[in-house]
Amino acid sequence: MQNGLVTLTDGANEATVTFDSSVFKDINIIMSPCNDVVIIETTSSAQESISIRGGAGDDTVTLGTVDNSFDTNIHANLIVYAGEGFDSVTIHDGSSEAEKTTKITPTAVQGLYADSTKSISYFGVEAMTINLGTEEADVVSTCNLSQPARTLESLDCSQIKKYRT
């Protein structure tokens, strides 16, 4: 059995749910109408997808961690549906040393995963920050980005070799 682990907290109290990730391949997280925070630090390689549905509050979704590379820790397709309020997504891939070609479109980010068939999809998000890796050969391309506002951050000045719009 491959254990999956979900920790729920309201800031003061915490509950942990363990499940067989080989059985539960698709996970849906439905946020409350409050200002919620969802952090996906790692997923099992057996996970197919994780869908996050925002509520009416100002929600924050963080994918990956500052200390771990995205491509070796996140294996599931991630889908973020923002709700009402101001919703933001932060993607951490700053620790990655893998050479990547990342494509950012109005509804998806492709090229961060080790598996090129996987992607992050997002809908109705007001703000997005993507922290990229340290590989100098990274290529970032964007197409038709008008909304949401997107910020690309790198760990060193030479990190983004090419930035196309």
Image (cartoon, rainbow, N blue to C red):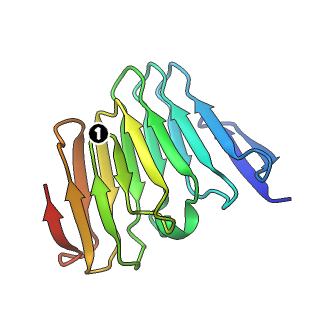
Q: Quadrant of the C terminus?
A: bottom left
Q: Is residue 141 visible?
A: yes
Residue 103 coordinates in the image, percent (x, y): 29, 57
Q: At numbered mark 1, what does the secondary structure look like: helix, strand or loop? A: strand
Residue 77 position within the rendered picture, expressed as x and y whole percent measured from the top left: 53, 50
158 relative position to 79: left or right? left
The residue positioned 46% from the left and 48% from the top of the image is 62
Please tell me which residue lies in front, 45 or 116. Answer: 116
The quarter of the displayed image where residue 43 is located: bottom right
**Pointer 1: residues within 10 angstroms few (<14), some, or many (20+)?**
some
Q: Is residue 68 visible?
A: no
Q: Nearer the viewer, residue 41 or 47?
A: 47
Image coords of residue 100 (percent x, y):
35, 72
Quarter occupied by residue 107: top left
Q: Give whichever of 147, 36 is nearer the camera.
A: 147
Q: At label 1, which amino acid type do we have?
A: Ala
Q: Residue furthest right?
A: 1
Vertical relation: 148 (above or below) 93: above
Q: Is residue 42 above or below residue 25?
A: below
- The residue under the point 77% across, 43% down is 17
Q: What residue is at 67 percent from the left and 59 percent from the top?
A: 44
Residue at image x 32%, y 55%?
A: 130
Query: Residue beneath label 1, please?
Result: 127
Q: Residue 140 at x, y = what percent?
A: 24, 64
